[in-house]
């Protein structure tokens, strides 16, 4: 399989603070990857760099062979950890916004996802609960037929049933030729859907493991491995 | 391009322009019903006040609108280059600015001159109007650039010293603006005018201002792309 994401010698500085220094990793297409790390380890920053929201990095970030920038934004779908929708916007207005600007946006799939999430398109964002707003934001991300999906904390602050719904939607609408990078602290819930895991500490990838190796060779679940990696 | 304009549209923004237009109208109304005899000086003062009020509002509202646009992740994630987004934003500001300027101008002239039979005379030529419009455009680009610079300064300067930096930045760029303008103007007037056969020095001023506009436009895009992160907390 080809590398969908290739990060080489990535250095990134924010103001006076060095966030990454010579970071390397690659991700193949067709995989669901969990990006795991403690708070402040740089997970969201990696997502933002891959999404093209910050460009003052050094090194190389390639997505499907293209340097991160305007072009990659057309096939990378990014779900931020906080949604930016205006509270007075109706869901259908946001759907039409995506439809206007993203050529890979599938309107029919968006409505399917809304039905799956039990959301009504005439609802206003401000009237949705946190869980429903999160489900809607995820629906908009998954409604794009993107090559790479970046999901930053899609399960945080969401109740159990909503979390289950979100995970079900990932499985149902995930396409084999795309990849998902997901950051979360809910390790048990994502354990059954991921293929690989990347452990991040202090701006460095300290372990890149496939779930198969983790379970069959190391005989450990994700939580046990997390403890091993982060407990000193 | 029109589908981008829909992103820039804001009810609050238009309401603010509408209020400014209404204030111009009210001031004119006060002049119309003034008990004392209306004078040319008073009419001119009210007219000038309306225009200045409009420009302050335009600079504050439009600078903030464009800044907030580039700070919004949803817009920055669009597969459209920053150059195109910035260009369209400026065009939108230009269209809105011209429409409301004409509105303010007409309301002020009608209320302060036409209705009370005071002859309105403006001692400016068409070329003067064009130069003034370009001056305002360049100043707007400079203000934009300063807004982006000061927003990125938070990563490099402590919060308590940031206001000092903003003042220093403004002074430096104002001096630079004036100096570049006069330097370029002298250069063109001395050499290029003769070379290109331009007889009127208005042309040289326009050329210098357009070069400045290009510089500030590109610098702003560079700062937005590299240092102004959207949705960053």
Image (cartoon, coloured by chain):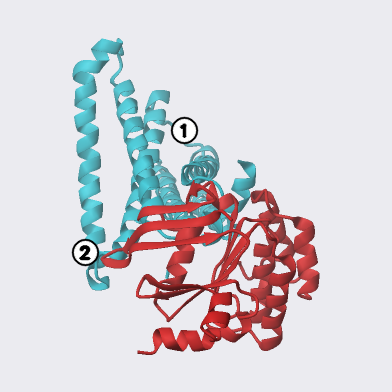
Chain colours: A red, B cyan
Can residue B22 be seen here? The reply is no
Q: Chain of mark 1?
A: B
Residue A83 relative to residue A174: left or right? left
> Splitting the image into 4 quarters, where does residue B128 fall?
top left
Q: Looking at this view, is A24 or B28 the one in front?
A: A24
Which of the labelled discs sits on residue B119, or is there none? 1
Which of the labelled discs sits on residue A5, or is there none? none
Q: Chain of mark 2?
A: B
Mark 1 Cα within 10 Å, few/some/many (few <14, many 20+)? few
Q: Looking at this view, is A215 or B53 the one in front?
A: A215
Q: Please tell me how many numbered marks the rendered image carries.
A: 2
Q: Is residue A67 above or below residue A42?
A: above
Q: Looking at this view, is A121 or B26 the one in front?
A: A121
Q: Is residue A180 above or below residue A212?
A: above
Which of the labelled discs sits on residue B164, or is there none? 2
Estimate the spatial distance between the alpha carbons at disc 1 and disc 2, rounded to whole Å: 47 Å
> Splitting the image into 4 quarters, where does residue A28 fall?
bottom right
Residue drawn 20% across the image and 24% down it: B187
Can residue A54 be seen here? The reply is yes
Image coordinates of residue A214 in percent, x first then y, are: 53, 79
Mark 2 Cα within 10 Å, few/some/many (few <14, many 20+)? few
């Amino acid at each position: 399989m080809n590398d969908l994401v290739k990060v080489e010698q990535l250095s990134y500085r924010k103001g006076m603070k060095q966030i990454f220094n010579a970071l390397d990793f690659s991700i193949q297409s067709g995989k669901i990857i969990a990006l795991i790390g403690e708070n402040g380890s740089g997970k969201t920053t990696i997502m933002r760099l891959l999404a093209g929201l910050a460009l003052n990095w050094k090194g190389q970030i390639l997505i499907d062979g293209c340097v991160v920038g305007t072009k990659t934004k057309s096939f990378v779908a990014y779900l931020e950890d906080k949604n930016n929708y205006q509270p007075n916007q109706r869901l259908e207005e946001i759907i039409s916004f995506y439809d206007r600007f993203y050529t890979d946006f599938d309107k029919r799939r968006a409505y399917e996802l809304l039905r799956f999430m039990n959301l009504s398109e005439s609802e206003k964002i401000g009237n949705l609960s946190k869980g429903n707003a999160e489900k809607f934001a995820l629906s908009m991300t998954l409604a794009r037929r993107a090559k790479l999906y970046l999901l930053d904390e899609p399960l945080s602050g969401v109740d159990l049933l909503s979390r289950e719904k979100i995970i079900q939607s990932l499985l149902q609408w995930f396409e084999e030729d795309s990849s998902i990078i997901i950051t979360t602290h809910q390790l048990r819930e994502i354990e059954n859907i991921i293929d690989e895991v990347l452990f991040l500490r202090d701006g460095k990838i300290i372990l890149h493991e496939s779930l198969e190796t983790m379970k069959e060779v190391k005989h450990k679940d994700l939580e046990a491995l997390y403890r091993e990696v982060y407990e000193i | 391009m029109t589908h981008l304009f829909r992103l820039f549209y804001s009810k609050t923004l238009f309401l603010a322009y509408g209020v400014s237009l209404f204030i111009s109208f009210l001031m004119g109304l006060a002049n119309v019903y003034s008990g004392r005899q209306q004078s040319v000086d008073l009419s001119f003062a009210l007219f000038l006040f309306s225009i200045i009020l409009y420009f302050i509002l335009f600079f504050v509202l439009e600078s903030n609108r464009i800044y907030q646009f580039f700070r919004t992740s949803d817009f920055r994630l669009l597969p459209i280059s920053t150059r195109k987004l910035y260009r369209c934003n400026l065009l939108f500001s230009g269209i809105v600015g011209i429409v409301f300027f004409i509105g303010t101008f007409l309301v002020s002239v009608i209320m302060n001159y036409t209705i009370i039979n005071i002859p309105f005379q403006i001692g400016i030529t068409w070329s003067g109007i064009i130069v003034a419009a370009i001056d305002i455009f360049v100043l707007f680009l400079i203000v934009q650039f300063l807004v982006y610079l000061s927003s990125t300064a938070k990563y490099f300067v402590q919060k308590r010293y940031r206001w000092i930096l903003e003042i220093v930045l403004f002074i430096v760029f104002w001096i630079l603006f004036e100096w570049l303008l006069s330097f370029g103007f002298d250069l063109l007037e001395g050499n290029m005018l003769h070379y290109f056969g331009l007889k009127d020095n208005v042309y040289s001023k326009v050329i210098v201002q357009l070069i400045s506009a290009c510089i500030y436009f590109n610098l702003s895009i560079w700062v937005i792309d590299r240092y102004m992160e959207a949705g960053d907390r």
